[in-house]
Amino acid sequence: MPEPGRARRPSRAGTAPPTRPSSPRRSVAAPTTALDAAPPTAPTMGEEEEFFVIDPVTRLASARAPEILAAAQRSDDPTPRTEAHLCGEITRYQLEAASPVCRTAGELRDHLTAARTALCEAAAARGLAVAAAGTAVLGDVGGAPLTAGARYRNIAHTFGALRDAHTVCGCHVHVGVADPRAAIEVGNHLRPWLPSLLALTANSPFRRGRDTGHASWRAVTWARLPSAGPPPWLGSLADQEQAVQELMLSGAILDRRMVYWDVRTSAHLPTVEIRVGDVAATVEEALLSALVVRGLVATALLAVGAGEPAPAPSDGVLRLAMWRAARDGLEGLTLDPIARELVPARRQVERMLHAASPGLRMCGDEETAHTLLARLLGLGSGAHRQRTAYARRGRVADVVDLLIRQTRYGLEAAAESR
C-alpha cells in the first residue's frame, strides 16, 4: 500500500424556524451502473451515523431523542420506514442510524438516505429537526441527560465530567474482514491515513455558539477519553490483547466496547471499524467516506496478502498529525506522518485516494469516489460551509439552519446556500 507522502462573539440565535425547500430534492443523484455494481470479491461495508436533535425555533440541541425514536419505530406511524437500525446514543440529545450490511455504493447510499429521511420526518412531525454535525452548535450539552441503561449510568459514574466527551456525533464505517489476524494488519496499514480521513470529514467548528478555531472540535473533545485516538502499531493478536488488557487494568475502559481507537477490530462483528470521522453533513459525504475507507481496506488486504509490511509512524507523530487535521480540516495543512512535513490537506486527501485506487477499482467505486470528492472540493468541507454560513450575517442560527437542510437534502442544499 503506498505510504503518505510517497504516493504520487456571535449574535444570539433568531427565533424564526428554518424555511423548507420550495421543491422536493434528492440527497444523491439517481442510481447509476457504477453505483449499483460491485464484484463479488468486494468486501462488504456498513455505516453508523450519529445525529443531534434540534429545536428548529431556538436552534438549541434538544433532549427529546427518545420521542423521535419511538415514533420512527412505531408500525402505525406515517413516517417512512427504513431497514437501518435506529437507536439512541449515550445522551438524549443524540440519535444513531446503522445501515444494514451493503455490497454496492448504490445500496449503501439508499440506506443512508432512507434512514435520514425517516428520522427527519419523525422529528418534523413533533416540531423538531435532526442535524448532522460533530458538535452541538448551540446549547450547553454538558451533563446531558442520559439515555436509559445501566451501562450508560456506569460510564457516567466512573468517568465523571469526561462523560461530556460522548456528547458528540461521529461516523463509523465497518468493512468486512473475516480473518482477525488480517484485520489487525489492515489496521496497521490504515494508521498513516487516519489524519487524512479526519481532514476529509471535519464538520464541527462551532460549539456553544462560538467558533472553536478547529475544523473538528469533535475530534479534540473525543481525544480526551483515555482509550480514544489512533491505535498502537499491533504486530499480532497477542499484542492487541495485551493492549486491551492494559486499558482494562488501568480502568480506562469498562468493557471491550470502550476500546475507542480510530481503527479497530469490531468486538462483535467480522469487520474492521474505522471511527475517525465526524458525522458527515450530507449523504454524499457519508458515502464518499465509506467508499474511501473500503478502498483503503481492500488495498491493504492486497498488501497483506503480498506480505508487504505496513508503514509505522510513531505514536507521537501520528498524534500530532491528528491534532493538525482536527484544527485545519480540509482547507488547511496537515502533517504527513511518514514524510513528517506539512502539506495541503487537499493534496494529502488526493494522495489517499490514489493509494486506495487498487481497492476502489476492485470494488467498482473508483469513478464514484473521484466524482464525489471533486464535488466536495468544489463546495468545501462541512466545517468550511458552516463557517461560510456564519460569515454572511454573523448569525449562528444560520449555521444550524444549514445543517438541518443539508442533513435531509444533501449537497444540493449546500450548493443553494452558497
Image (cartoon, rainbow, N blue to C red):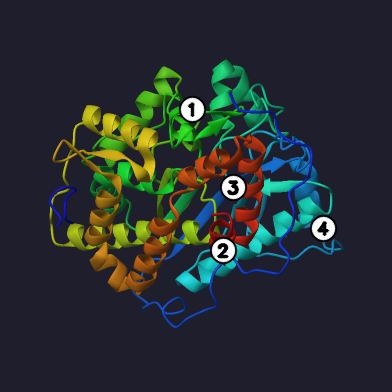
Q: Which residue is mark 1?
A: 212
Cβ atoms under marks 4 and 1 closer than 8 Å:
no
Looking at the picture, how far across and down is residue 68, in whole percent? 77, 48
Q: CA distance from mark 4 to mark 1?
A: 39 Å
Q: CA distance from mark 4 to mark 2?
A: 30 Å
Secondary structure under tag 4 reads: loop
The residue mark sitting in front, 4 or 2, is 2
Secondary structure under tag 1 reads: loop
Q: Which residue is mark 3?
A: 132
Q: On the picture, is 39 further left or further right than 181?
A: right
Between 129 and 378, the one lying in front of the other is 378
The answer to which image quadrant residue 80 occupies is bottom right
Cβ atoms under marks 4 and 2 closer than 8 Å:
no
Q: CA distance from mark 3 to mark 2?
A: 15 Å
Give neighbour class at mark 1: few <14, some 14-19, many 20+ (Cα, 10 Å).
Answer: some
Give neighbour class at mark 3: few <14, some 14-19, many 20+ (Cα, 10 Å).
Answer: many
Q: Looking at numbered disc 4 in the image, what kind of residue is underneath it?
A: Arg
Q: Looking at numbered disc 1 in the image, what kind of residue is underneath it?
A: Thr
Looking at the picture, how far across and down is residue 148, in whole percent? 73, 34
Secondary structure under tag 2 reads: helix
Q: On the picture, is 359 further left or further right than 278?
A: left
Query: Mark 4 vs mark 2: which is more N-terminal?
Result: 4
The residue mark sitting in front, 1 or 3, is 1
The disc at residue 412 is: 2
Q: Residue at the location (61% across, 22% down)?
A: 156
Q: Residue at the location (30% across, 57% down)?
A: 296
Q: Looking at numbered disc 3 in the image, what kind of residue is underneath it?
A: Ala
The answer to which image quadrant residue 290 occupies is bottom left
Cβ atoms under marks 4 and 3 closer than 8 Å:
no
The disc at residue 74 is: 4
Q: CA distance from mark 1 to mark 3?
A: 18 Å
Secondary structure under tag 3 reads: loop
